[in-house]
Image: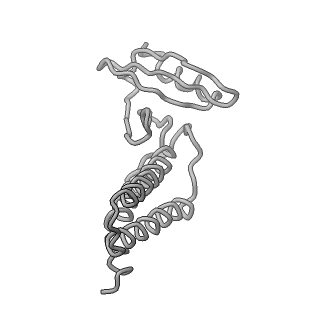
Amino acid sequence: MPNWVSALGIAILVVVIPFTLILKLMLQLPKPDALSHRRWSLPVNFGIIGAITAYTTIFIRSTYYGRIANPVPVLMQFLIAALAYIFGLVLLLRQFSGLYPEYLITTGRSGLSIRKIAYRNIINIEEVSRSHDESRLCIETSHGLKHLFTLPVPYVTALYDRVKPRL
């Protein structure tokens, strides 16, 4: 099997399958009432997945089949590939954070984790900062956890209205 085909096969297993599974699961969420960030079209999302797959293929081909003797360039290429992978994952996940009918979804501090918080579990909301278009909130839950959540300014009152009867 040619080097590029086997490298592409590994990249598909590492990038395409997990990313499309995550995208498919996130697209099954109910229609959001307010999103923290703009949701992109499917071709743009698949373009992100394709670009990361292409770079992962190039990385696998150059490191495994390139026979580089010095480990420092391999480590640097790995770090670049890992950062591209993480950045793509964050770009996909952050599109789905926002207000939903029964809960809100946030991506956490790093953007690599999805947190679903039911409105009934919110005990306190504190506005940390506000820019011209968005407000950064600290949400405290009944479990004692605090989560940072970004929401466009016009939708902050909608969040307070959903939580107010419980506060």
Q: Position of residue 126 (x, y in %)?
A: 50, 16
| Total labels drawn | 0
Asked whether the viewer can see residue 11, the reply is no
* Quadrant position of residue 23: bottom left
Determine the residue located farthest toward the top in the rendered image: 167
Q: Is residue 150 left or right of residue 79?
A: right
Q: Is residue 150 left or right of residue 81?
A: right
Q: Residue at x 44, y 35 (%)?
A: 106
Q: Is residue 70 left or right of residue 107?
A: left
Q: Position of residue 151 (x, y in %)?
A: 56, 31
- Viewer-side residue, 137 vs 2: 2
Determine the residue located farthest toward the front in the rendered image: 70
On screen, residue 28 above or below 48: above
Q: Residue at x 31, y 17 (%)?
A: 144
- Viewer-side residue, 68 vs 46: 68
Q: Residue at x 54, y 31 (%)?
A: 150
* Quadrant position of residue 1: bottom left
Q: Position of residue 48 (x, y in %)?
A: 51, 60
Q: Position of residue 127 (x, y in %)?
A: 55, 18
| The C terminus - image quarter | top left
On screen, residue 135 above or below 34: above
- Viewer-side residue, 80 vs 39: 80
